Amino acid sequence: MKGNVWKFNILMFCILLGLLISLQFKNVKGEFLFVPLKVIHEYKLAIESEKKEIENIKEIIEDRKKRIAEYEKIKEEGGKFKETISEELKEQKLISGFVDIEGPGIVLTLDDGTRELFEGEDPNNILVHDIDVLNIINDLKVAGAEAISINGQRLLGNSEINCAGHTIRINNQFFAQPFIIKAIGDAKKLEAALIAPGTYGELLKEFGLYVEVNTSVNIKIPKYSEELDFRYLKVSEEGE
């Protein structure tokens, strides 16, 4: 009887050992599954993307914390949220070009030339073209102009300057010479960007076009007056 019990225990031990060995082989086999490099690379990109997303979210959270702290400070000091938001709105309008502004800068008068043409010379040499205006505007931007207008039209990022016969179209309106370009910024730098040797403004003058530049301690530039129609532009979702 005791021998049978002993044999039974041996049998149960062998069965249990067999199960453990089979489970161990199964686990070992799973650790060495073949994974293509492309899949590894995709996982790496996904992880990096998630890390970047986390960093963006952290920045948004920090920005919101600062904003909340500012609002709490305003509340503690007895300030009014309406006034704070109104100031923020006013600042945004100033940045985007939807308020009248003033400051130091320059006034440039650009007009066709009146000199006699040389024999066989192209008359276009002494006419103002849209490319001339574009180059002048670009030079002013490089010199740090913070706001620019042409014949009273405030230029924004979406403003177009196209030649239309003897006129130039700006913000969907047509203007003839002379072109009065106003720019607010460091007056001396703006002036130098137009009249210094080698500048495009100086080149136009040498060709015979009328170019006059005056600095002023106070230039007034009106706000952008046209309607904006964004058909494709939309605000990105936070964290995108």
Image: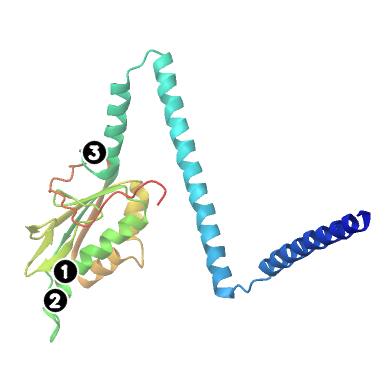
Identify the image quadrant of residue 104: top left
Residues at badges 1 and 3 in contact (C-beta under 8 Å)? no
Q: Residue at x 51, y 54 (%)?
A: 50
- On the image, which quarter does residue 82 sit in? top left
Q: Residue at x 21, y 41 (%)?
A: 98
Identify which amino acid the numbered label 2 is placed on.
Asn
Quadrant in which the N terminus is drawn: bottom right
Distance between the alpha carbons at the discs numbered 1 and 3: 28 Å
Task: Say which residue appears at 40% left-offset and 23% top-offset.
Answer: 71
Label 3 and label 2: CA atoms lie apart by: 36 Å
Please determine whether, in this image, residue 21 is positioned above or below residue 104: below
Q: Residue furthest bottom?
A: 120
- Which residue in the protein does label 3 denote? 101
Few, some or many C-alpha atoms within 10 Å of disc 1 (few <14, some 14-19, many ≥20)? many
Circle 1: residue type:
His
Q: Which residue is mark 2?
A: 124
The residue drawn where x is 26% and y is 59% is: 137
Q: Which mark is residue 129?
A: 1
Which residue is at the front of the view, 98 or 23? 23
Residue type at the position of mark 3: Ile
Estimate the x, y position of residue 225 in percent, counting from the top left. Answer: 13, 45
